[in-house]
Amino acid sequence: MDKLRLKAARLGRSRGGQTSKVHLAADRKCRPLALVLTVGQAADSPQFIPVLEKIRVRGPVGRPRTRPGAVAADKAYSSRGNRTYLRKRRIKVVIPEKRDQAANRKNKGSKGGRPVSYDADLYKERNTVERLINKLKAWRGIATRYDKTPESYLAGLHLRAAMIWIKDLTRTTP
C-alpha cells in the first residue's frame, strides 16, 4: 500500500437521475481499498478524510496498515484541511493546486505560504482509480443502479469490489 489514489464518481442512475456518488480509494493495481457512498450533490473534498479513515490493509502478521506512503488525488481534493491532515499523518501529498487557490495564496504575499509542489510522475498514475471505476461499471447492477436503497447499492459495490480482489488474487497465485 505504498501509493494510493482517490476519486469520486457518479455511478448509475435511479428514477430521480444521478442521485448517488461513490468516493473511493484504490491501490496501484486498480483494487478498491475503501468505498463511501453519498448523495449525488455532495462535494468531493469533505469525503476525503472519511475515505482515508476506512482504509485497512491486512498483512501476513500484525495489525492492518492504515497509512499509505503517498496519496494522489484530483484538484477537487486540494483543500488546506486535506493537505494538513496528510501532513500530520506524514503522507506524501500528490494533489495539484487549483488556480483560484494559487491566486489567493499569491495575493497574500509572503503570508500565503509556499507554492504547492507534487510529483508529476505519481500524479499521472492516478488513472488507476478511473480504471477501477470502469471495472465497477462493468457489473450491470452497479452501472444501471437497479437498487433502490443506498444500503443495497453499497452492498453491491462491496460485492463487486470483493470480486475484483478475488480475481486479482487468483491471477497472482500460481
Image: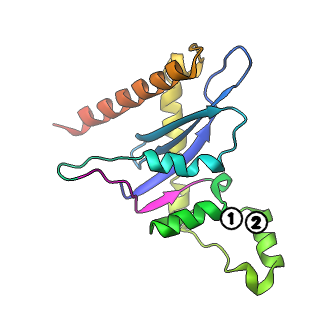
**Badge 1: how crowded within 10 Å, few (<14), some, or many (20+)?**
many
Residue located at (74% from left, 18% from top): 16
Q: CA distance from mark 2 to mark 1?
A: 7 Å
According to the picture, the residue beneath numbered tag 2 turns out to be 101
Total tally of numbered discs in the picture: 2
Whether 70 is among the magenta residues is yes
Residue located at (45% from left, 53% from top): 4
Residue located at (73% from left, 61% from top): 98
**In the rendered view, would you say 34 is above or below 18?**
below
x then y, percent, for residue 6: 53, 48
**In the rendered view, would you say 62 is above or below 135?**
below
Q: Secondary structure at mark 2?
A: helix
According to the picture, the residue beneath numbered tag 1 turns out to be 97
Q: Are marks 2 and 1 in contact (CB under 8 Å)?
A: yes
Q: Nearer the viewer, residue 51 or 171?
A: 51
x then y, percent, for residue 173: 19, 37
- Stretch in magenta: 63-73
Which residue lies most toward the bottom here? 110
Question: Residue 83 is drawn in which quadrant?
Answer: bottom right
